[in-house]
Image: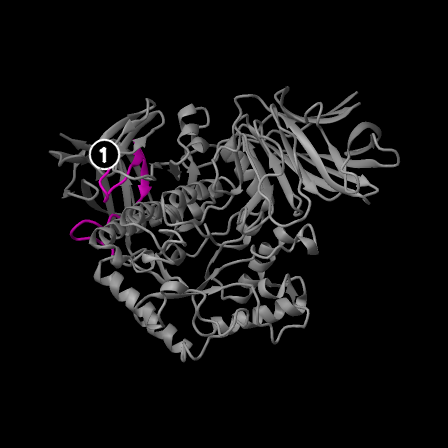
Amino acid sequence: MRRLTALAAVAVLAGCGSRPTVATGLAVRVDTSPFRVALLENGKTLVAEDAGARLRYQLAASGEQHRLTRVTKVSGDLYTVATDEPGRHALVTVEPTPTGVRIHARLVPAAGVQQVYDAFGASPGDHFLGGGERTGPVDLRGQVLSVKVSESCAYAPVPFFMSSAGWGAWLENVQVSALAFPGSPGGGGCRSGDEPQCAFPPLRDRVEVCVRGADLTEDLYAGDFPRVLADYEAAAGRPRVPPLAELALVQWRGRTVFTGPGDLLEDVRRFRAAGVPIGWVLLDDVWQDCMGTLRFDRSRFPDPAGLVRRVHALGVRFMLWISPKVVCHEGYPADARLGPADDATLDLRRPAVAAEFERRLRALAALGIDGVKGDRGDETDVEPYGEALPNGYPVRYARDVVAALPRGSAILFRAAFSGSQAVLPGIWAGDQTGDWAGLQAAIRSGLSAGASGFPTWGSDVGGYDSAGLTAEVFARWAQLGAVSPVLEVGGGGPNATPWTLGPEAMAALRAAAVLHYELVPYFQGLLARGLPVLEPLAYAYPDDPGAWRADLELVVGPDLVAAPVAGAGTTPSVYLPAGRWVDLFTGAVVAGGGPSFIRATPLMSFPLYVRDGAVLPFNLRTARDSWWGVDELEHPGRAGYLATSGATLDLRGQPRAVQLFVPAPRPPRRVTLGGRSVPWTWNAGPLPGVVVRLHGPTVRGRIALAG
């Protein structure tokens, strides 16, 4: 017996930077004996619950698993389904949506049910993205992911994934959950805490999901990667657009290299002397008189407001490290802590505790603090207090912080979950080691975060545990920071005082930071439109096997491909997808779609390519007469763009002053726009090319370099 429900077709126009879609002609099929749900597209099965491992559940007392069997009653979208356990049935709602189908299964009675599973068929060639910010391989195939916010496993996991077969899924449950993909060895994946885990058998040809508790809610989406990601964000919360200032460079020192308040002023002077743009100084976790008071240690910081004013007088913003960890809890209710006394976190579920936490944050904001770096929210195992608390806690923590700070404050968090992206204007990658392995972990963190709905992301250049950091690793990490929306420089080693790494490291930092500032208008435009900034190469080119193998390369918006140097040496292997690409550091046009190739990459450059024919916002500031100041993110009355030779411009609503940068390997004989010669100057490097300055409000025509 089957029941078929048609869905309304969804049409979305595709254009430059838009989200393509294939989610048309959808229908839901429900088989009633045995009970099984499938999502169809144009009459063909797109994804279906696995015939042998579909909806099932596990008992807490015995560990036995039981299955849903046949439908005994149908009332609209609600199905009453028998199980193979006497005395228990399931109520399952199968609700068609414009983007796919929502399935909600609840066991009745719920008592004794430890977790609920579902499984979906997959083919040998299917690949998967998502799962939250992770440091492992970007393709989830072969992996088991524990979805529990924790310092030891994942700072920002989400129960969401996308398949290259044209579908995706999101578990709406906040409870601790897990995902397992074809080729995985079974088990529960990374463990955090002593509580029972969701565990899976070895998998060959299916995806499995598991949620702790007696109910499971899952959305299935149809479409390619961009469409599915957009649909997930529409349901879980669209990413919050960060304030422009959050894209400026943040400098900080960890406690092991912090000597006193004067460090903040010294760092600004050092960066300015080296020509490195700087927008923020961050005061790390050395400022409190006792962890949890959110009160300055007056013996070390006698005049906090005066320190903030001195930083502001230098034209730099002030960011403060905060956390919900509490050792000294005076002023809070007696039972305000969760966890052991030496590793406790505030119980922000309690209104009185949250109100006092917010009051203290408002007092800090009154000193002139411009933003905060919200650490922790993931260190204390709070699962003993509720299966939904580990994943719900960082979202609650974020809401309290946002509620307490002035509108427009910069906020970066380490811990996050589904929904955090709608509250927080940004996350950072947490703690990595200051070596090549740490850099690779940071790259994969940025890629997986971008494929999971966290577009505003960055990492600490050089890592956190960075006492042994070398100048080479620091320089290459800075280049990752150049193409990341958030650029932080600091840690527990010489990256906190990068001038101690030598002049070559500082020169590389300056080049990377300048490039980051040049790209800021591009980042800003993508974030304002709700589009991802960093994504795996396979996100944009899912049918290209080479893109899946190149899992340390990034697409940066729709028009750039970056291949950060993630190992020792200056001759990395680069893979480019099909098409023509322009090497920004040489101006040369390179054909993609062939095998990987070796590209010589001195320390001051890295493989960065722009799609031929692209036009993107770009404030070139390496020219001798740069229109933008060293620390400026924007300049009133001026706009800049990067366009490849042969690209067609259609720029409207521009300010009077518009600058075009056209990459080229050598000076041309002639530059034309719309067939007419225009004056130009040559920019020798580090990005070679032509600079053309025009007047708005409209700039139209084909830009071409001759000779």
Q: Which residues are magenta?
A: 601-628
In the rendered image, residue 113, in percent from the top left (x then y), is placed at 78, 42
| Residue 165 location, quadrant | top right
- Which residue does the image show at 34% across and 38% down from the upper left? 562
Horizontally, is 43 left or right of 593 in the view?
A: right
Answer whether residue 618 is magenta in the image.
Answer: yes
In the rendered view, tell whether residue 272 sits above or below residue 599: below
In the rendered view, tell whether residue 508 sits above or below residue 286: above
- Which residue does the image show at 44% across and 74% down from the upper left? 367
Which residue is denoted by mark 1 in the rendering? Answer: 600
In the rendered view, tell whether residue 57 sits above or below residue 322: above
Answer whether residue 324 is magenta in the image.
Answer: no
Horizontally, is 306 left or right of 571 in the view?
A: right
Element at badge 1? loop
In-front residue for pair 186/529: 186
In the rendered image, residue 52, in percent from the top left (x then y), is placed at 71, 23
Horizontally, is 556 left or right of 378 in the view?
A: left
For the C terminus, the image quarter is: top left
Q: Amino acid at mark 1?
A: Ala
Q: Main secondary structure of the magenta part?
A: loop
For the N terminus, the image quarter is: top right
Q: From where the camera sits, is residue 655 visible?
A: no
In the rendered image, residue 226, in percent from the top left (x then y), is placed at 49, 35
In the rendered image, residue 667, in percent from the top left (x then y), is placed at 13, 36
Which residue is farthest right? 87
Which residue is farthest left? 669
| Residue 3 location, quadrant | top right
Q: From where the camera sits, is residue 144 visible?
A: yes
In-front residue for pair 518/122: 122
- Which residue does the image show at 80% across and 23% down from the upper left? 33
Mark 1 crowdedness (10 Å alpha carbons): few <14, some 14-19, many ≥20: some
